[in-house]
Amino acid sequence: MLDIVQIAVMSDNYIYLLHDHATGLTAVVDPAVEAPVVDELMSRGWQLDFILNTHHHGDHVGANMALKAKYGCTIVGPKADERRIPGIDIALSDGETFTFGDHIADVYDVPGHTLGHCAYHFKTASALFCGDALFALGCGRMFEGNPAQMLNSLDKMAALPADTRIYCAHEYTLSNGKFALSIDPDNQALIKRMETITALRNAGTATVPSLMGDELATNPFLRTNDPILAANIGLNGADRVVIFAKTRSLKDTFRG
């Protein structure tokens, strides 16, 4: 059994604690800040053995060195960006695996948001930790990569089973959904999902994790092969990379 504890920090970040019952090992994914992680560990009587980083941005690695100094934990991150991951001990590339107690994570390189971004898929737990590569109803801005890279990264994740839970690193779902509706207004699955999301946010409840099956039906960045969506943005019959690039550009300037 893999326990997953979600910690909301800062304005919209999520940090995740992973705990393997069989071995007692504990990991943290993308620790932006130290204190909430330490508080949660203490409340559960857990020690910290690993840090899993998805990419180098400060709101994902900000507590790396403080936590390493306190617990002596091992820091794991993407080989493609190891020089920008503070304190990294284990650098992993696409197709490699990371063993965490009784669980094995498949590692995917998912560049686009940054050039050295990775994601961790724990198949037996049906859990994907994808940082800022994929969001509920969205995807990360392309700060360093290009549309072809980002689309390829999204395709890798979209190929995972429909029951995969997507543990992304930010609570952006409501604003992402408003954009999705602006270019896909007749999508009944999206309309229904947004009703649920709005109710959750009004109650102060997280919308993350989401399910891959729901993303495939409603996330415009995973639906670049849908002719209706393509037509809605004036690109009927266009190449998928072109459709993705236009969709991302529209989202970047959306003020809904």
Image (cartoon, rainbow, N blue to C red):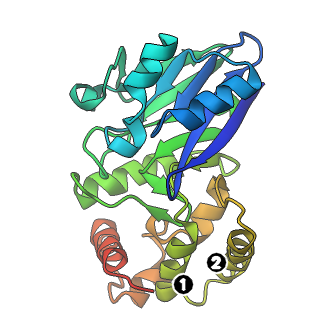
Q: Quadrant of the C terminus?
A: bottom left
**Disc 2 target residue:** 190
Looking at the picture, does residue 144 appear above or below residue 77?
A: below
Q: Residue 246 occupies which quadrant of the picture?
A: bottom left
Q: Is residue 9 visible?
A: yes
Residue 234 appears left or right of 10: left
Give the residue drawn at x 75%, y 70%.
Answer: 203
Give the residue drawn at x 31%, y 52%.
Answer: 113
Give the residue drawn at x 33%, y 71%.
Answer: 248
Residue 157 appears left or right of 252: right
**Disc 1 target residue:** 181
Contact (CB < 8 A) between labels 1 and 2? yes
Q: Quadrant of the N terminus?
A: top right
Q: Residues within 10 Å of mark 2 (few under 14, many from 20)?
A: many
Q: Is residue 122 visible?
A: no
| Residue 50 numbered tag | none
Residue type (three-letter) at the residue carrying disc 1: Leu
Marked residue nearer the N-terminal end (1 or 2): 1
SS for callout 2: helix
Residue 141 appears left or right of 99: left
Looking at the picture, does residue 184 appear above or below residue 251?
A: below
Whole-percent x, y for residue 198 in the image: 68, 77
Which is more toward the observer, 135 or 30?
Answer: 30
Marks 1/2: CA–CA distance: 7 Å
